[in-house]
Amino acid sequence: MDVTFRIRRQNPEAPGKEKPYWQEFALPDVDPTDRVLEMLHRIKWEQDGTLSLRRSCAHGVCGSDAMRINGVNRLACKILIRDLGEKIQVEPILGLPVIKDLIVDMEPFFDHYKRVMPYFVNDDSLPEDGRERLQTQGDRQQFDDTTKCILCACCTTACPSFWANGQYVGPAAIVGAHRFIFDTRDRAGQERLDILSEPNGVWRCRTIFNCTPACPRDIEVTKAIGEVKLAIRKGTNVGIIETDAIH
Amino acid sequence: MQIHKHDVIIIGAGGAGLMAALYASKGGADVAVVSKLYPTRSHTGTAQGGIGAALGNLDEDKPIYHTYDTVKGGDYLTDQHAAKILAENAVEAVIELEHMGLPFDRTSEKRISQRRFGGHTRNFGEELVRRACHAADRTGHMILQTLYQQCIKNEVNFFDEFQVVDMIVVDGAVAGVVAIELGTGEFHIFHGKASFFASGGWGRCWSVTSNAHSLTGDGAAIALRRGLPLQDMEFFQFHPTGIYRMGILITEGVRGEGGVLINSVGERFMERYAPSAKDLASRDVVSRAIYLETRAGRSIKNRGYMHLDVRPQTVNRYFAEEGRDQKDFIDDETIERKLPDILDFCRTYLGVDPVKEPMPVQPTAHYAMGGIPTNIDAEVVIDAAGTVMPGAYAAGETACVSVHGANRLGTNSLVDLVVFGRRGGMKAAEFARGSDWAPLPSDAGAEIEAEFERIRNGSGKSRPGELRQLMQATMMDNVGVFRTEATLLQGIDDLAELRERFYKDLHIDDKSRIFNTDLMEAWELGCLLDLADVTARTAIERKESRGAHSREDFKKRDDENWLAHSLIYQKGEWSDPAYDAHFDKQVDLSLWAEEIEAGVPEEQQKFRPVERVY
């Protein structure tokens, strides 16, 4: 099939291209099962080497190539042409400053992530037998969903609350916190809940639900945010997630 | 050029780099991690099935069994002492990862869960053992995330999206590296007492690969260009189960959970090639079997792929045949829970649901056994005698210890990077404490800056994308799973022509400074061309078949003449190099020697090189 790509471009160094503009590229002989990333590579490698984007693993695991594709946040390597049709529009994700073409400044995103103590904390003494800490598979499953996050920013940059206020930590950071708040081995849950109950924490979320369908890893982001809100309201991270419902 | 000064400069932020960063920091060193990707984008994150460690949580297991499997899997080219360190250190390294919060799956006893993996056995090959510690089928993702998180906690300095493009060698020692800040295009010097290469592999030399686009072997190519040897470059692993045409990896864990390979006549053909381990024979064995079945006209639709079947009815049928316990039988839910990412890949990219249909798979270029030679403390060595290059360190896929020998066992890549990243991090910190700063030469960085200007200003007709595609095609056809003198000569010829075009006829579109990915990709292509070339050149010299190196004109392993590591050196101009390959670095056979010394009768010796049977 023939496909037309319409790409939002910008190059701060190229005279006349400092401001965003749209450029179209025609691609013949596209297989419906081709990924958008492969087609962006075809454009870059065969037509216009100046087209700039980030990418690495090309199968939805590294999180480099988040873009707004036909108005929806996606990983370019994880969406097929057959799911988009013959006219495909690609833009940088919203809410972060554009550096060049599809490349945005990710620093504010990672700064938010780092604010929520996204690391395991437990200073208790280690098991005396020198072995692993113990945990039931049920307790392990409580936070399974949020361990899948690849920090691609699809959720945060799909969130109108984040667009309106870049100081809001955003869904990805809350997901990052959730992964530890509900890990029974961790000891800093309350500190994270305190951070997230600040004005730019979890209460900026108005449950608009854009984040969940944006997630390429199928994390139930809104649900995770809801669980964090509930934990703050109840003042505890225990008993928030019903373990019975988990395998 | 801006100059940054840190005790230990780590190049690459995957598992090996982050592990090294953590342990060098804990050792008191001021550490900088310089990486062309944001750390969490690194390829460690795509490792799926597990990390091997003889914890014995589900089956009886010992590090010595893991050592034996690693040596045998490597077709006896593995250095035995290094394999022993790998297996022994793996146990504490995995426990440490758990203590750092890594969310492993759990057994009913609340311990780390383990699964079967290719080539991992109990009691010296007696039966498959559950040794691969896993977090669903995203174990590498969890390792990468956990290590990055711990680095944030420990306030490690990161230079994200700084691509290292050269190393600074002064009087035979490394004084640091040169990097380009991608966001500005500016060159920076990182002046360090120790420079630690953890920059990953080069699967992008081949057209069908499981490797990320970024796996262009930068670190190994830089080392080669600066006079360091590369070791065992002829050994590159093809993983048997990549998604047909795309090469995306389908973990061996699928077969660990009972999945089987089926040919076009519905036969579980691995029963013929490996009667004992069957589908879980080592990867080189399974990949060759797929090619041989294809040649015999038994690939699916005659298109060179096989079916990987993990449907419960299939798995349980074979489990019943093997007399496995009913409680091992699986259902749809087992697959959904244990292999969620695999299901997602197949559903997304193929429209195939592995719970209901088999997956189409073919061998995919996966892992470099060879690389920058190091000792067991990740110190770079530069000759057959093991002479250490002061200040130079390497670990992970870019290094060659050698624990993988001629063929790496599944899960051992993750073991390698945590074990040797950790050992190397400690060693580099120790080195930094006891050494002075080597002075930087006044022209540091000038040569590589000029090389980038050459690429940027090239006015030829050859686009990097075209050259890359041609390189990948010739490597796939001529330097792939099976090789002969004729194919290798063809490969070397093709690569020479491509190099000629790369240096004399290149053209890129993007002339700008900020995020010039066109420029960086072109430079990376040059790295790939060098690594492809040394792969073909060592492969043509090694006139035997061993592990992943299968010569159809020399079908047998030949220990008498070839039980040795190769070292290849590059000399002369980058545009017109000469190569010098030696096959005189001895394989460490110390465990076998211990058996002989202890008077163990020959037939009971476990580490004597014998023919591999699975």
Image: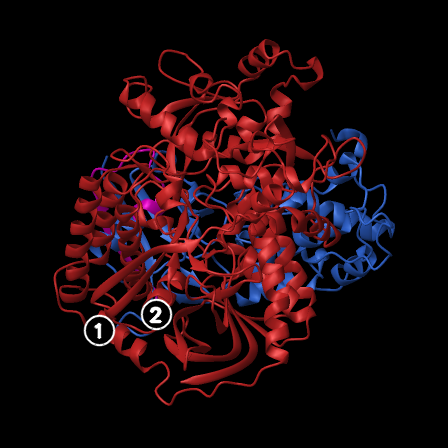
Residue nearest the observer in this picture, B125 or B321? B125
Segment tinted magenta in the rendering: A19-39
Chain B shade:
red
Is-magenta flag for residue A26? yes
Q: Earlier in the sequence, mark 2 or mark 1?
A: 2
User: Is A208 on the left or on the right of B223, as rendered?
Assistant: right
Estimate the x, y position of residue B416 in percent, counting from the top left.
56, 51
User: Which residue does the image show at 57% across and 59% down from the upper left?
Assistant: B376
For label 1, the residue is: B454
Q: Name the chain under label 2.
A: B
Residue type, label 2: Gly
The percent position of residue B436, horizontal first and vertical second, equals: 56, 85
Q: Mark 2 highlights which residue? A: B227
Q: Is residue B372 above or below residue B235?
A: below
Question: Chain A drawn in what color?
Answer: blue
User: Residue A216 location in percent, x, y?
Assistant: 52, 43
Disc 1 marks a residue whose amino acid type is: Arg
C-alpha gap between disc 2 and disc 1? 22 Å
Asked if badge 2 and badge 1 are on a common chain, one would say yes
**Residue B87 located within the stretch drawn in magenta:** no
